Image (cartoon, helix red, strand yellow):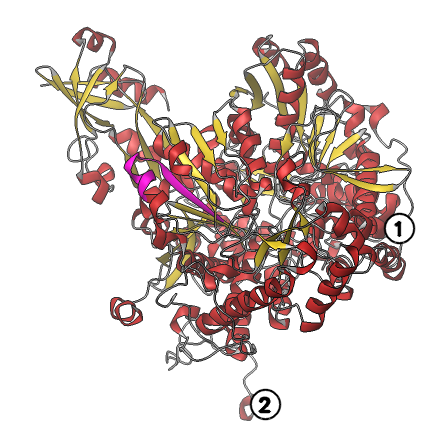
Amino acid sequence: MRYLGQTAADRQAMLAKIGVADIDALFKDVPADALNAAIELPDHRGELEVERHIGALAARNLSPADAPCFLGAGAYRHHIPAAADHLIQRSEFLTSYTPYQPEIAQGTLQYLFEFQSQVALITGMDVANASLYDGATACGEAVLMAQRATRRQKAVLSGGLHPHYRGVVETLMRQTDQPYLAAPMDAEGNEDLAALIDEQTACVVVQNPSLFGHVRDLRPLAKACQAKGVLLIVAVSEVVSLGLITPPGEMGADIVVAEGQSLGVPLSFGGPYVGLFAAKEKFLRQMPGRLCGETVDQDGKRGFVLTLSAREQHIRREKATSNICTNSGLCALAFTIHLSLLGEAGFTRLAEINHAKAVELAGKLDGLKGIKLVNGSFFNEFTLALPKPAAGVVEALAKKGILGGVPASRLWPGEKAAEHLLLVSATEMNTEHDMSALRSALEEVL
Amino acid sequence: MLNKQGRQTTPNAGADNSGPAGGYATIGGHKGLEHEEPLIFEQGEPGRCGVDLPAPANVAERLGGLRRKGAIGLPGLSEPQVIRHFVRLSRKNYAIDMGVFPLGSCTMKHNPRLNEKLARLKGLGDLHPMQPESTVQGALALIDELAGWLKTLTGMPAVAMSPAAGAHGELCGLMSIRAALIARGDARKRILAPESAHGTNPATAAMCGYTVDPIPATADGRVDLEALRAKLGPDVAAIMLTNPNTCGLFERDIRQVADMIHSIGGFFYCDGANFNAIVGKVRPGDLGIDAMHINLHKTFSTPHGGGGPGSGPVVLSDALKDFVPLPYVIHDANGYRLVEQDESGKSFGRMKGFHGQMGMFIRALAYMLSHGGDGLKRVAEDAVLAANYVMASCDDVMSPAFAGPCMHEALFDDSFLKDTGVSTLDYAKALIDEGYHPMTVYFPLVVHGALLVEPTESESKDALDHFIMVLRGLAERAQSKQAADYFHGAPYLVPRRRLDETQAARKPVLRWKPAQDNKAAAE
Amino acid sequence: MTLYFTKDHEWIDVAGDTGTVGITVYAQEQLGDVVFVELPEPGRGVKQGGEMAVVESVKAASEVYAPVSGSVVESNDALAADPSLVNQDAEGAGWFTKIKLSDSGELGGLMDRAGYDAFVKSLG
């Protein structure tokens, strides 16, 4: 077995040193009838066999590399620079752990500090943590944090919030019987959330751009929230949008959560991704998750450590701000490397390209065979109202080798108004040819 | 004398290798292979860019008038600058690939590179989570196959795959228990957990609205059954117990614990963080547990990656198997289906975006296939053998907290350092200069000055022997009166010496900020 | 002015109907370097034995319980800027809050200096 280091002779020598006759003597505390139970599994295999086995599973899927792909809805197909994927595979990053010993983890700590700085800058917020699992769980944590900070309970959830984010919040709230108000689906992007705020409201959660793609000016809502002591939580499921759109921090957000997958992290069928979490400085001690801070070492040199740990589960236990321990370190690194490569100019340019592609695609499809563009505004994703149920159209497109979008009914099941809606995204990955292929295929299936 | 004309083959006595070169400090601040590296924000120039992107098409903007005004403040670097920056940073990290990483409770084992390759395969690494079911049958089959391995290895009938890490798995397990209790009209209030539990246990219980009642341990490091009995009552929802426990010991009364909790209608949650000690050897399903999370990033070797991502599937007993999070995969006549909406009325809802940590599933399955059932059993045996070997080799100069045998972790207390002036922390820091990552220190809390050593099955006997030599050498050195100052100053041979955590927490600096004038210029 | 102590290592110095509250020298030693203190806002009612404040060091966090019932008159703003005052002068400049007592009878259940010193000694 190629991963195990002991020879039979080693094992004998070690058992002798320990002073036992055989390995099972070390398992003497296990109930005898439970030890060495027959476990029916195949024997070990070589690299080649394993590669063949998993390769065969991969071959049963339709890779977006082989199909024009317009899927978004919270996960976006972007180009990952070769340098980013190479660097995260360096042993010192890949096979290290949470920086519990800062003297030999300055590499991890410094990139976490840089990650936090980048997240704060692009969201327009004061501080950011060292990552959470994904955008949806970050959204759940934000609601719990708002409850702590305001000592109120009720959460108001926008009808333009990604149903997975909403689902996570609802699951968490149900555990402690907390009230929440989930607004009806808002495909048009014109809901009035301010009207739903009352004296018990801890927070309003709104997504920008919304699930349906609308880009909204959140300043009036922020004002209404502030007037009633309610925290405004803004969720961003496509982080590239922050290269072009006014950041939530500038529009008055108290907490910003985002899905960071678009920068450096492969789609990987939904995970692992990286949750971004940023807030105003005054809420610092209510934040969940790890924080990396600057300090000096014994010789006075600048260095970094995990800090404000007294918020966390390993110290505060049942009173911790969250139960999170492992977060998403390596994905945060991929994010940081990709954003470092892009820099100010590249990040803005990438966002511009995405927007231009989407505008172009919307122009090609709006009006085609009764298709109507729902959006007035959008970034790289928009909603189309189709003359037929969208789920069937997507299936028909898939048969033609085109991943044509996400039917809203998959995210809003049972919602009549969702049935004909299709979410379509375009990124820098989509070529002119892709767009024409989608247009012709839609002409055929509609 | 003969080599006087040639190069010197031994360093000068007393030369401080960490400090100035030949009496001089280096001019530029670097020290040989060790480079000082500024923040990325301190090296950028506007106008530089590490990617080439075409000019966007000229279109009429549709951003609703919300185009950002002003600069973000991100630095601009070329690709070589970025690569050099992160390579230099990487060299300031310790890693499993460099040496023994005996961090107790974390299972820092070898991360096969095959698994990295497979996670990046076309048709897996690039799959979009919202593709139609018909286009992802292989992905769903992979999830189902991994689920099958997990069920077989644990002897449990069901597994929830979506939790993103161990603590998230705990949350899943408790939500499942809560849902089952509510379904029978019997909401309860209390969770029992040993004093030695991971901090995630009480934190998770609190998220589910439970109060946590700690159970003391016996003198031999196991759950005190009498104390447990005294805490039982009709309001107890569950017990959360780590097995093997955080002291590195198998809970030999585990079946009595299961019977006791079941007798009052409660559930048995097992924290599976230490599954590596028994994988392939003992099935938790044979011990009476109802739910257990499995850290794929521990037992099944998905890389820890500097603190994640992880993955924490939860195996469930018959009593809990319907109370699962969404989504889940099923297999019927038409192939694999991803069930995203509750069909049974028993699911407790969604826990994260999309369907789980697929990238980790691929790696974990590759690890399992590589080991096979025979290899996994060997994993547990070798891990337990290695820990006992360390303990037996050091028990005369260090102080095991409990009598052996231990499972996959050897736990020491700090009584071997008594009256030396050397603390557990000092001892750990001295290990760094010896080229080792320290063991887990000051956990579990129930042992004074705890040192928790988990060598894992990945280490050869040669590597263990060297590690043991160092552990012993430092323990012996601590006994010398002159050595305390040396220990207090350790580590010496590192990019940064001990860091001031008090300053970091009193005056938090959590991000780079542009200098005031830069900001004004940007606006 | 009379000093009283609790088993949770708080002290209260009572003058008239108002008591100044802090944590003891022993408590700050156990905590280590204090990095943050969360104090109640003036006007908040507190109950004897109820949570009143939180004190954090690098490695620990601890609730501070009200030694008496009453309402918070003032909290020590200086601790926000310089939490190290708790380490330097726990029973002086490192005070936490002033409480207007609602029931001076509660003082009867607290310890005096000698009683507290003996209690600490018994902890080993």
- How far across and down, in percent of the image, does residue B212 sit? 52, 21
- Quarter of the image with the C terminus of chain B is bottom left
Please give the residue where the numbered disc 2 appears in the rendered image.
Answer: B2
In front here: B252 or B376? B376
- How far across and down, in percent of the image, does residue B230 sit? 58, 9
Q: Is the residue A382 above or below the residue B61 in the image?
A: above
- How far across and down, in percent of the image, does residue A413 sit? 67, 36
Secondary structure type for disc 1:
loop
Secondary structure type for disc 2:
helix
- How far across and down, in percent of the image, does residue B412 sit? 58, 38
User: What's the magenta region?
Assistant: A223-235
Asked if residue B158 lies left or right of residue B502, the reply is: right
Chain ID for label 1? A
Please give the residue where the numbered disc 1 appears in the rendered image.
Answer: A44
Q: What residue type is labelled 2?
A: Leu
Whether pointer 2 and pointer 1 mark residues with C-beta atoms closer than 8 Å, the reply is: no
In front here: B284 or B438? B284
Q: How many marks?
A: 2
Mark nearer the viewer, 2 or 1: 1
